[in-house]
C-alpha cells in the first residue's frame, strides 16, 4: 500500500472550529494544516458514489485523535508536554468507512508512545477523519471495508511485494 506523509502539530484540548459554545473537554490531537485534505477525499467519495454522498467536514478540522475526550488519562504529569510540537503523520491513501465516518488509516509508533507516557493502553486505530456521513445516506456495499480488513490486505501486499 502507498503511504503519504503530512506534517501536523500537537494540540491539547482543541475546540471545534465553528462552535460558538464554550468547549472544555480534554483531548489530544495532531492537527493538520487547513489545506483541504478532507475536501479532496470527499470529492473522491462523491465522484465514486454520487452527489448523495456529500459529507460533513470534521468539526475539529483535519486531525488525528490521540486521546479522545471520553478516555480517562491515568497519569497527567506528561499532559501538555508536546504542545505545538511538529510531527510527521504517515497515512494510507485508501479510504475506509466506519460508523458514520470516512477516514484514512494513520500509522505511528510515536503516538502509541505518547499514550504510554499518559498511562494509557495503545490505540488500535489512529486515523484522519475525512468526513461524517448523514444517517439518511445509504452505505454503498463497496464502502463496507473495516480497518481490520484493510490491515490484512496491506499485510498480504507487504508480504508478497518486495520493499523498495
Image (spheres, rainbow, N blue to C red):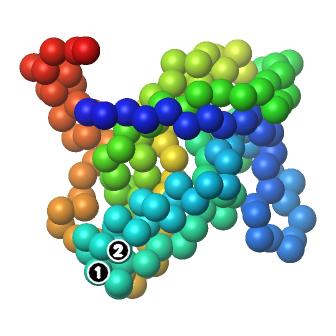
- Percent of width and height locating residue 31: 68, 44
- Percent of width and height locating residue 150: 25, 40
Say whether residue 66 is left or right of residue 48: right
State the image quarter where residue 1 is shown: top left
Count of numbered circles on the image: 2
Say whether residue 21 is left or right of residue 68: right
Q: CA distance from mark 1 to mark 2?
A: 5 Å
Tell me, for residue 50, which label it has, or none.
Answer: 1
| Residue 20 in sight here | yes
Element on which disc 1 rests:
loop
* Badge 1 density bin: few <14, some 14–19, many ≥20, Cα 10 Å: few
Q: Is residue 24 above or below residue 1?
A: below
Q: Is residue 52 above or below residue 75?
A: below
- Tell me whether circle 1 and circle 2 mark residues in contact (CB < 8 Å): yes
Q: Using the image as rendered, state which of residue 43 and residue 77 is in the foreground.
A: 43
Give the residue displayed 30% in from the left and 73% down from the top. 47
Give the residue displayed 81% in from the left and 45% down from the top. 13
Q: Is residue 49 above or below residue 126?
A: below
The residue singled out by tag 2 in the image is: 46
Amino acid at each position: 500500500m502507498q503511504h503519504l506523509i503530512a506534517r501536523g502539530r500537537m494540540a491539547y484540548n482543541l475546540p471545534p472550529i465553528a462552535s460558538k459554545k464554550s468547549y472544555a473537554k480534554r483531548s489530544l490531537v495532531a492537527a493538520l494544516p487547513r489545506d483541504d485534505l478532507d475536501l479532496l477525499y470527499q470529492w473522491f467519495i462523491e465522484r465514486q458514489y454520487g452527489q448523495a454522498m456529500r459529507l460533513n467536514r470534521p468539526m475539529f478540522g483535519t486531525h488525528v485523535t490521540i486521546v479522545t475526550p471520553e478516555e480517562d488519562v491515568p497519569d497527567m504529569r506528561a499532559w501538555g508536554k508536546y504542545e505545538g510540537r511538529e510531527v510527521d503523520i504517515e497515512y494510507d491513501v485508501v479510504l475506509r468507512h466506519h460508523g458514520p465516518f470516512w477516514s484514512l488509516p494513520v500509522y505511528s509508533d510515536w503516538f502509541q508512545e505518547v499514550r504510554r507516557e499518559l498511562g494509557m493502553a495503545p490505540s488500535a486505530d489512529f486515523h484522519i477523519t475525512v468526513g461524517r456521513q448523514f444517517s439518511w445516506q445509504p452505505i454503498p456495499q463497496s464502502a463496507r471495508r473495516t480497518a481490520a480488513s484493510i490491515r490484512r490486505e496491506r499485510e498480504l501486499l507487504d508480504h508478497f511485494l518486495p520493499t523498495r
